[in-house]
Amino acid sequence: MFHAKNYVLAQSLDEAWELNQKRTNKIVGGMAWMKMGKQNYQTVIDLSALHLDQIQETEDAFSLGCMVTLHQMEIHPGLETCFQGAVRESVRHIVGVQFRNCATVGGSLFGRFGFSDVLTCFLALGAEVELYRAGRMSLERFASMPYDNDILVRVLLPKNGLRVAYQSMRNTATDFPVLAVAVSLEPGKGWLAAVGARPGKAVCHPWPQDPSQPLSQQMEDFATHVQSHTAFGTNMRGSAEYRRHLCGVLMRRAMEKIKSADPTLADC
Amino acid sequence: MTIKFWLNGKLTEDTIAADTLLLDYLRTKRCYSVKRGCETANCGLCTVLLEEKPVLSCSTLAARVNGKHVTTLEGLQAEAEEFGAFLADQGAEQCGFCNPGFIMNVLAMMRERKDPTEEEIREYLAGNLCRCSGFVGQERAIQAYLTWKREGESV
Amino acid sequence: MKYVNAPVRKKDAMALVTGQPVYTDDLAPADCLIVKVLRSPHAHALIREIRTDAAQKVPGVACIFTWQDVPNKRFTYAGQTYPEPSPYDRLILDRRVRYVGDPVAIVAGEDEVCVDRALKLIKVTYDVLEPVLDFRKAKDNPILVHPEDDWKTLCQVGADNRRNLCASGKDAKGDVDAVLAECPYVVEETYHTKANQQAMMETFRAFSYKDVYGRLNVVASTQITFHVRRILSHALDIPKSKIRVVKPRIGGGFGAKQTSVAEVFPAFVTWKTGKPAKMVFTREESQIASSPRHEMEITVRLGADQGGRIRAIDVHTLSNTGAYGEHGPTTVGLSGHKSIPLYSRADAFRFTYDVVYTNVMSAGAYRGYGATQGIFAVESAVNELAARMHMDPAHLRQINMTREGDVMPAYYGETANSCHLEGCLTKAKEMFGWEEKFPSKDMGNGKVRGVGMALAMQGSSISNVDTASVSIKVNDDGFYSLMIGASDMGTGCDTILAQMVADCMDCDMENIAVYGVDTDTSPYDSGSYASSTTYLTGMAVVKTCETLRTRIVKEGAKILKCAPEEAEFDGKGVHCLADPSRFVTLKDLANEAMCANDNALFATESHYSPVSPPPFMVGMAEVEVDLETGKTELLDYVAVVDCGTVVNPNLARVQTEGGLVQGIGMALYEDVVYSSQGKDYSNSFMQYKLPTRLDIGTIRVAFDSSYEPTGPFGAKSIGEIVINTPSPAIADAIYHATGKRFRSLPITPERIVMEEGR
């Protein structure tokens, strides 16, 4: 457990941001990860009072406040329909309901953890994040930025009519993934795959739709491409070689799922 | 710092250190049903209700419950006895150490889902580890409890 | 009989399900000093210098102890009957540290914050030494784990600290090599099981205080209350008369708490400071500095004739006891003595073994206690023999397995006086649908189902060693106090023994108050381990009740003014045989016995057994393997157990289910993994994965009971045997699904995809 001298329930984002500029201060999200550290902080900053625990749906996007919990995402009917269950699928394996009632979307994404299911899934959904100072940017860009003292305020999931599927392989049901793959297809535009738990941070691979190729060929080419253009590593949960193998399997399964869910995508 | 919150329905005011975990704090308030089984948020032994939702008190700052309602098994004794009797009738309580967290989550599940399927039960309770029972007896107890509820709590 | 064989609720059940404060840490005084230890970051080192001056100055710190402050007499933490087979190779703190996590200093203070600060301020200079980490290279390695001159063994177990040998030995009958040479079918393979953590939900913990008589009182979460008294006496070098140990409710043990892992530290602090002290292990400490299963590598040679009759079994076990020898010399014995006798009709057997020291955490006792490892090896070899002979492995067992009345040469020549193994197999096959499912089924979607099976046995107590005593007294109004020295660790022995009392005394369960365990007042019991309590303490209950009944009759006869031979006790009271209308109720009798009486209505009896009757069982597993990912889903597990008379069907069933799930974890993912420097990576529940309820599929349990003539009401044991079948059964099911043979555990998805598995 970390140590902290003070706890501040921020009354405004401005106050939170000011406090967060000090190196020894830290924003607490769901705390599931942070509590395992042994750091000494001067002040921990809580964003709980800023009404950032809501999922709002507009005509063209979902807006998730950073304090929205994983369980809220899991049971949200709008997300379920719009993303064909992929969001729920990405979080339902994470430890247990009590854990998912603590862990927040902001904490999951800000940490940019290698094992993050949420990061993997949201990358494929083309998510954007809203940072208090730096403003809006793609999650993909945010994921590649160094850690700083800004505040991740919201996550935006655009409603682009995506076809989505989420696949992960775990050694036990509620363990971290050995590998996670999220694939989306924006009909007429192209495919996007995110590969997480490599075990490094999730990476994205776009792939154009090529109408001259049969769908099954496109899918096979894309799977092979992602498999060979992703860097994999070894940790306790699996070797780089196994992960590369799994990547091909999960890519094909994700695309197959998308294809079988939508008859209009049938091979011609 | 000071906090003011409802512990098992009773308004409670206290001075705490900023980094006190809810789990440790609750045990100082004699809520001994709240147990620690790990340091990595994996076991579910420390489950309590925060604003009616099951959370891990090992991953919650006590400071965060200010103005809120916290419920432990000490505050749900009637429900604990009611469901616990079904567990006891299977012998599935075994060492009992995981029971309070498990029962808190069962009661939370019952509030969230009226008639959960077997799969939903397993998924909802997956974060509650038990090393004695192999889970099977726990699930027999839940099924018997659900049946009893469905049949209008007769007998 | 009213209670034996009935699904009686555990006597403590409602207290547990309502979360009452009944465990060690719930009971500790609020003003306990908090005790923690500084642990070695090195697998092997000598402490050159240790400076505690800065740490001593932290406000709130009460005391700091290093190797210079502790008694210099070696002892063992193993909870075994004296003289212990485990070598005396420990000090509370030693100048030589032997694994990453070995205690270096003890710190006690007013709260965790000051103790944590002090721990950081202790400055240790180590002379880092090369460790012995590969247990295959430990024997006769020039690097010695225990080079010290005061290392000693109390029993002849074939130990030699100058060779890194904690034990070695041999047992044989017939000429194995000659018989094997005659066999047309010989399987010779080597199997490897890893260390596993018991992972009981309540970590190791104890608190201590001095009582009004200046004696050291220790309340501990332990399975071995009486042994802890002796261990503390040895460790602290103080008389046993100065120590009292009490066991409250404990949050699981599974053998982990058959080793005194935590007790010594708070006890030493209290003894030195006079202040109450408490130590609660973190989960990390429970994972890295505890008492896990012995890693073993077992080579099996199995020979059969043309018809599939197993003629010879040769087993060699190499066991890794780690840095200290707790349970090292004894666990290894079970790897042969409780695997080979499953096929006692063989013409010859040989069992040889070495137990070696290495620089990883000490192993200990874990449910199954070596039998689990041996059965994985022998049952896997039998499954391989079946495959080699194109024979159904169930049929191969039918030809060869031990049957009632068979003498078991590899089991100290004991006879299987109660054995329904054949009935278990028949029932298991039927419940499981073995004939239909064997060997595999391609589901046509990249997934293949496969089935596998295994037999298992264990013992019931340690023959000619374990001792159980029970006291029962009659109180006012005729209720009974049952005092036991066996440690209920959640398994329900308090209840099971009370069930037996109720039937022996013809009374209601409510009429019996159970008390245990307190070394000052409980009758002696070696403790709850070695599958002994139901069988051995149960028999002590039967004997005690017989004696107590005699005394009640005597008291009743006195009141009724007839001879004791002419009176009878029926549970309600004593009456004259000749004239049943002359009757005194137990209530009146008991109350009268509290006035001008010289016949104590109290009985104590002890029991030991010259035999250790094995329970038997059959386990069958059906898995579905995703051939692309290697993911193995356990679909169905059927277990049929012969534990003799089932004293409490609910508790026996839950024991079985719980043991099976631990075995499933062992087979598929539980693994203690060390770095190349000897650091334990499996240091949390995040990294050491236990099965969750989503991982286990369907589990079905049934009983086929024999009647054990030497057991109480015909009962044998059940606690340990139930963990033994999953590993070999699941490994063979995976073989049938994938065609790949895995001889080491755990069988992870990656291995299924990436390894050849020949």
Image (cartoon, grey):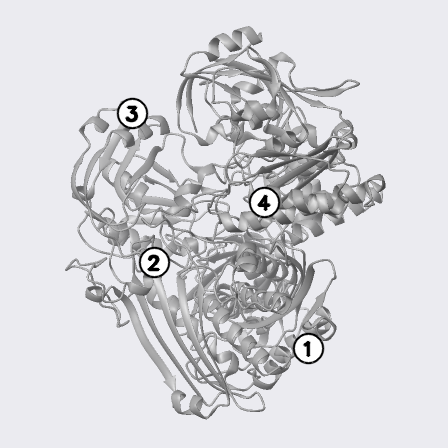
Q: Is residue C108 above or below residue C218?
A: above
User: How far is the residue under mark 3 from the one under mark 2?
Assistant: 34 Å
Q: CA distance from mark 2 to mark 1?
A: 40 Å
Residue at disc 3, secondary structure: loop
* Identity of the residue drawn at 71% across and 69% down: C432
Label 2 is placed on what type of residue?
Ala
The chain ID associated with circle 2 is C
User: Chain under label 4?
Assistant: A
C26 or C621: nearer the viewer: C621
Q: Is residue C415 above or below residue C99?
A: below
Judging by the rendered image, the residue that carries numbered circle 3 is C60
The earlier-in-sequence mark between 1 and 3 is: 3
**Res A86 → quadrant:** top right
Type of residue at label 3? Gly
Dot 2 corresponds to which residue?
A: C78
Q: Residue furthest front?
A: A212
Label 1 sits on residue: C426
Residue under the point 52% across and 18% down: B63
Who is closer to the viewer here, A225 or C474?
A: A225
Identify the disc placed on residue C178. none
Which numbered tag is attached to residue A227? 4
x and y percent of residue C709 in the render? Answer: 55, 79
